[in-house]
Image (cartoon, helix red, strand yellow):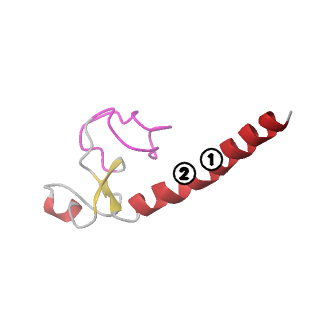
Amino acid sequence: MNNTRIAIASALAAALVLPAGTSQAQGNMEKCYGIAKAGKNDCQTAKSSCAGTSKKDAQPDAWVSVPKGACEKIIGGKLTPS
């Protein structure tokens, strides 16, 4: 029983640590609208329910994560949805 409790505590600790690491990586990223290929968006849009469901290339409300500062260098890339 003691080993089971240790395993559960370890799994819980790992689950709590993982989101902190990903948020640091996201701090260097930004949403770039209007550049995603059909079906390649990162998250939901006004017309799509979840990631990977945008209907057309360069859908104005579909976005992908890019390194900060890169979006405005991409043709058609915008920091806000159209």
The dominant secondary structure in magenta is loop
Which mark, residue 30? Answer: none
**Where does residue 45 sit, x and y in percent of width and height?**
44, 46
Q: Secondary structure at mark 1?
A: helix
On screen, 44 above or below 21?
above
Q: CA distance from mark 2 to mark 1?
A: 6 Å
Amino acid under disc 1 = Ala
Which residue in the rendered view is the most extreme toward the front? Answer: 2
The residue that disc 1 covers is 15
48 on left or right of 35: right
8 on left or right of 63: right
Residue at position x 86%, y 33% from top?
1
The span shown in magenta is 38-60
| Callout 2 touching callout 1 (CB < 8 Å) | yes
20 on left or right of 55: right
On screen, 8 above or below 20?
above
Amino acid under disc 2 = Leu
Residue at position x 44%, y 44% from top?
43
